[in-house]
Structure formats: structure tokens, C-alpha cells
Amino acid sequence: MSYPPPIVPPPPTPPEKSAACNCAHCRSRHLMGPVVLIALGVLLALQTVWHRWRFEHTWPVLLIVIGLVKLIQHLTPADPLRHR
């Protein structure tokens, strides 16, 4: 007795490359500009309100913020079907 060959479904087709990706990895890539601008605004506002918080002493906070955003970008998973 011979068995019919198993039915194998076709592999899933990846989404179109032209479509905007909405995965967490791609969304996190657009964080850098707004987050740095917000941090810069906060540091300059602190200098204006409290003269003790001078920008020349607080600018390293910008480097920390940039590093944190880069870490978030690195740790967010990419959609495996879209990013091969």
C-alpha cells in the first residue's frame, strides 16, 4: 500500500520591501533626533533656571543619552521576515 505524498504548505512570503516597516527595531531607529533635542532643551533650561547647572558642566549627559538610545536600538528585535 502506498501513501500519498505529504502536503507541504508553501513558505510564507516576506512583506514587500517598499512597504514601511513597523517593527520595534525600525521604530527605535527614529528615536535619536527627538531624544537628543529633548535632552538638550532640558539641559539648556536648567542653565537658564538654575545658574549653577551650567551647560559646560552638564554636556556629558548628552553622551549618556545618545549611548542609551543606541543601546535601545541594538536590543530591540528585528522582524525576521523583513530583515534578512
Image (cartoon, rainbow, N blue to C red):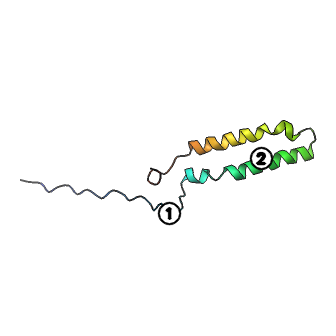
Q: Which mark is residue 39?
A: 2
Residue 11: percent from left, percent from top = 33, 56
Q: Residue at x 20, y 55 (%)?
A: 6
Question: Which residue position is annotated with label 1?
Answer: 18
Give the side of residue 47 with respect to residue 36, left or right.
right
Give neighbour class at mark 1: few <14, some 14-19, many 20+ (Cα, 10 Å): few
Which mark lies nearer to you, 1 or 2?
A: 1
Q: Secondary structure at mark 1?
A: loop
Q: Residue at position x 72%, y 49% from top? A: 35
Q: Tell me the distance, in whole angstroms, between the alpha carbons under discs 1 and 2.
A: 33 Å
- Per the image, label 2 sits on a secondary structure element best described as helix
Which amino acid does the dot numbered 2 rest on? Ala
Q: Which mark is residue 73?
A: none
Residue drawn 23% across and 57% down?
Answer: 7
Q: Which image quadrant is residue 74 in?
A: top right
Relative to 73, is 2 on the left or the right?
Answer: left
Q: Position of residue 62 (x, y in %)?
A: 75, 41
- Name the residue rendered at 80%, 39% in the picture: 59
Three-letter amino acid code of the residue under disc 1:
Ser
**Where residue 9 sits: x, y (%)?**
29, 58
